[in-house]
Each structure stands twice: as structure tokens, then as C-alpha cells.
Image (cartoon, helix red, strand yellow):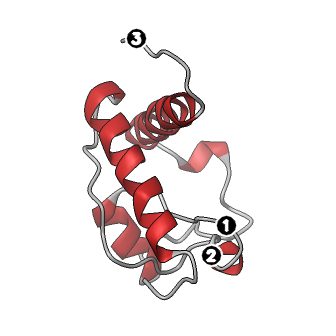
């Protein structure tokens, strides 16, 4: 919302939301008006930037809920199957959106 490229970021967000609807197996995406606690902030005035995250946990992590967040304990063993399914969902969404934006034909 505060980016010099807010319109481009919004278009990118809608592309990912549409890819999520069509190709992701879990965790429906929604588009929000702002990003917070994200590593994309330094880039948001240079390139369209969005944050892909699971809403509830994103809010919790941003408030310090996740004790592993940016800590040495942020390792494979601290994650559950649900966490890995979330990662798969993010990959499905992102790869489908990138393929579509690049003009590739994507089939389910």
C-alpha cells in the first residue's frame, strides 16, 4: 500500500490469488492491502513485491508467537506435517502464477 509500485504489486497479488484458487490443494489465498513483518520490504519500491503467507500464523509470527522465527532453532525438526503442507501450497501457488505470467500453458 505504501510502495511506489503498489499498483504492480496489487496486480501480482491478484495473479497469485487466481493461481491459488486453481492449483493449490489447501490454504486458500486472500489479497490484503498491506504487508508487515516481511523480508520483501527493502525491495517494494524497486520491484512489485508481495508476501505469501498463511493468514493466522502470519499474524501470530508477526507478534512473536512462533519461538523459532529467525532463531537458530528454525530447523527442519521444529516443523510439522501441517507446516510442510503449507510450504507445498505456497509452491503450488507461486509456480502456477509464475508460469502463467511467463505465458506458459498450465494444466492441473
Sequence order check, earlier mark of 3 and 2: 2
Above or below 90: residue 12 = below
CA–CA distance between discs 1 and 2? Answer: 6 Å
Identify the residue position indicated by label 1 in the image. Answer: 47
Image coordinates of residue 86 in percent, x first then y, are 41, 41
Q: Which residue does the image show at 30% across and 69% down from the upper left?
A: 32
CA–CA distance between discs 3 and 2? Answer: 31 Å
Picture quadrant where residue 38 is located: bottom right
Mark 2 burial class by Cα count in 10 Å: few <14, some 14-19, many 20+: some
Image coordinates of residue 78 in percent, x first then y, are 56, 50
Q: Which residue does the image show at 37% across and 39% down from the upper left?
A: 82
Q: Tell whether 83 sits left or right of 22.
A: right
Q: Is residue 92 shown to the viewer in this render?
A: yes
Q: Is residue 53 shown to the viewer in this render?
A: no
Where, quadrant-wise, is the N terminus in this rendering? Answer: bottom left
Q: Which residue does the image show at 52% across and 79% down from the upper left?
A: 37
Mark 1–mark 2 CB contact (< 8 Å): yes
Q: Nearer the viewer, residue 63 or 8?
A: 8
Sequence order check, earlier mark of 3 and 1: 1
Secondary structure type for disc 3: loop
Picture quadrant where residue 47 is located: bottom right
Identify the residue position indicated by label 2 in the image. Answer: 44
Above or below 7: residue 82 = above
Mark 3–mark 2 CB contact (< 8 Å): no
Above or below 24: residue 69 = below
Identify the residue position indicated by label 3 in the image. Answer: 107
Image coordinates of residue 28 in percent, x first then y, are 25, 44
Amino acid at each position: 500500500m505504501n510502495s511506489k509500485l503498489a499498483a504492480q504489486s496489487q496486480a501480482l497479488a491478484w495473479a497469485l490469488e487466481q493461481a491459488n484458487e486453481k492449483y493449490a490443494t489447501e490454504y486458500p489465498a486472500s489479497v490484503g492491502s498491506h504487508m508487515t513483518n516481511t523480508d520483501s520490504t527493502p525491495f517494494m519500491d524497486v520491484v512489485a513485491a508481495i508476501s505469501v503467507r498463511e493468514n493466522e500464523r502470519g499474524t501470530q509470527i508477526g507478534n512473536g508467537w512462533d519461538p523459532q522465527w529467525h532463531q537458530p532453532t528454525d530447523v527442519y525438526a521444529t516443523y510439522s506435517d501441517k507446516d510442510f503442507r503449507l510450504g507445498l501450497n505456497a509452491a503450488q501457488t507461486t509456480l502456477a502464477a509464475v508460469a502463467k505470467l511467463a505465458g506458459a500453458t498450465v494444466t492441473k
